[in-house]
Image: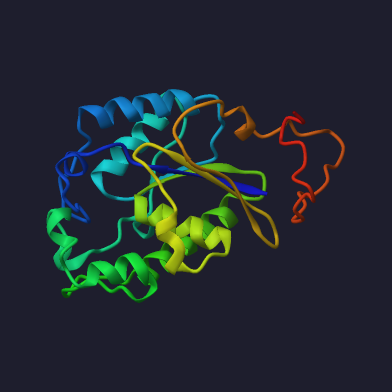
Amino acid sequence: MTTVILLRHGRTTANASGLLAGWTPGVQLDEKGQEQVAAVGARLAPVPLAAVVASPLERCQQTAAAVLAGRDLQLQTDERLGECRYGDWTGRPIKELVKEPMWKVVQQHPSAAVFPGPEGEGLAQTQARAVAAVREWNARLGPDAVWLACTHGDVIKAILADAYGMHLDSFQRIVADPASISVVSYTETRPFVQRVNDSGGDVSALVPPRKRTRRSRKASSDAVVGGGAGPAGA
């Protein structure tokens, strides 16, 4: 059972200013964002990670670097985890974009939303490439791995929608705040969503159990009827 921790980057200057950053170069974490990523790096320090993979955009590279502090790992970059390409919407204030006719499409029928301009991308395309990236990294790292993907809010929401088996048109119901973690474990037949928009608290359940000397049982793809007792049996 491969587990991915989906980490959204910390707050940026664009977030604080109400701008849609997209692939705008040079967007950095602001002071609050730097505090957030330092805290999440410390929080995740006890969790052994098989890999840390990030979007190529600066805000994710900065955030991933905070998680890597003190670890003997090199940062991996995967463009498929990059932000949705918002085309002509890039860099514009959100308060202007809400007046655009396509805003309602993005909110109510995002699977049909294709952002305007030659560099614009459809949200369905964003989901397809991001989910493909997660599944390829799962296969590369193996069934016992816990790894971290540092990416963007809409990308995380799209991955979670896929893991839930939700249509992309419902993905706006999911929230992924700056520096929050969401966790998905993938078995042979289905994913299990373990956490969503988690900004604090204990992460000990993410530490893989010690391998037994005897051959361990393969992780089940079955859900526990009634909900079970949780990872610690509590």
Q: Identify the image's colour scheme: rainbow, by chain, secondary structure or one colour.
A: rainbow
Q: Is residue 63 above or below residue 89?
A: above
Based on the displayed image, in which of its 4 quarters is residue 107 positioned?
bottom left
Residue drawn where x is 31% and y is 73% of the image: 113
- Residue 106: where, in percent of width, then height? 30, 67
Pick the front one: 173 or 218: 173
Side of 52 relative to 186 (left or right): left
Q: Is residue 40 above or below residue 86?
A: above
Residue drawn where x is 25% and y is 63% of the image: 85
Residue drawn where x is 27% and y is 69% of the image: 104
Quadrant where the C terminus is found in the figure: top right
- Residue 233: where, in percent of width, then height? 77, 31
Pick the front one: 13 or 197: 197
- Residue 2: where, in percent of width, then height? 62, 49
- Residue 219: where, in percent of width, then height? 76, 49
Side of 60 relative to 86 (left or right): right
Callout count: 0
Q: Is residue 175 above or below residue 133?
A: above
Q: Is residue 27 above or below residue 172?
A: above
Residue drawn where x is 80% and y is 51% of the image: 225
Q: Identify the residue at the far right of this view.
A: 214
Based on the displayed image, in which of its 4 quarters is residue 17 positioned?
top left
